[in-house]
Amino acid sequence: MSTNRTFTMLKPDALESGQAGNIIQMILDAGFSIKAMKYTRLSEDQAKKFYEVHAERPFYGELVEYMTSGPIIAAILEKENAVADFRTLIGATNPADAAEGTIRKKYAESLAKNAVHGSDSDDNAKIEGEFHFSAAEIF
Ligand code: ADP
Ligand code: MG
């Protein structure tokens, strides 16, 4: 059953380029509501753990380095069909392949620095949300 929730991070490049406000506005305009949000910076251990599924991939080291390079904004979002609809809103992993009007098409710098994270399943949305937020921080 769908939980109607997903988890996102605005990645260091999005904050560095000053686009966080515009990206959050796009998310709200698409019908998502914010159930948890924080401005933080991942430690190396946190980034390694968060992206553990990619540990064997050649870009893992680069990914961890990038995700710890500056602050992020983490959030839990709610909307009907949240996981799939949010993936549609952010667009393809590589901004060169992302559809017009998507967040990555508008704001991502490159395949590595692609502005936003979006969970890929309801199970991962729950795991990732709980990785970043305690029960008292989720509304
Ligand atoms: P998505 O974020 O779209 O779910 P993945 O889960 O496949 O994409 O990858 C996680 C993140 O790792 C991507 O968002 C991107 O920042 C980075 N990444 C993925 N593939 C590459 C690659 N080939 N080279 C560098 N970084 C990559
Ligand atoms: Mg992914």
Image: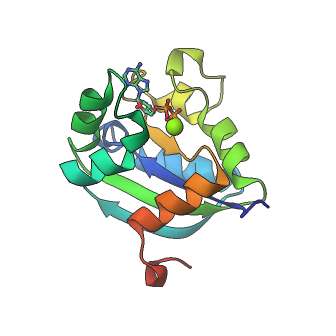
Q: Nearer the viewer, residue 31 or 76?
A: 76
Residue at the spot x=57%, y=62% of the render?
126
22 w.r.t. 13: above or below:
below
Q: Nearer the viewer, residue 72 or 4?
A: 4
Q: Nearer the viewer, residue 26 or 63?
A: 63
Say if residue 42 shows up in the picture: no
Q: In the displayed image of the protein, which residue is found farthest to the front?
A: 56
Say if residue 116 shows up in the picture: yes
> What is the image's colouring?
rainbow
Q: Is residue 62 left or right of residue 94?
A: left
Q: Is residue 65 left or right of residue 22?
A: left
Q: How many marks?
A: 0
Residue at the spot x=42%, y=47% of the render?
10
Q: Quadrant of ligand 1?
A: top left
Q: Position of residue 60 (x, y in %)?
A: 31, 30
Residue at the spot x=49%, y=63% of the render?
129
Q: Is residue 133 left or right of residue 67?
A: right
38 w.r.t. 69: above or below:
below
- Quadrant in which the C terminus is drawn: bottom right
93 w.r.t. 49: above or below:
above
Q: Position of residue 40 (x, y in %)?
A: 28, 60
- Quadrant in which the N terminus is drawn: bottom right
Q: Nearer the viewer, residue 129 or 26?
A: 129
Residue at the spot x=48%, y=57% of the render?
128
Q: Position of residue 68 (x, y in %)?
A: 23, 44
Q: Position of residue 27 (x, y in %)?
A: 60, 51
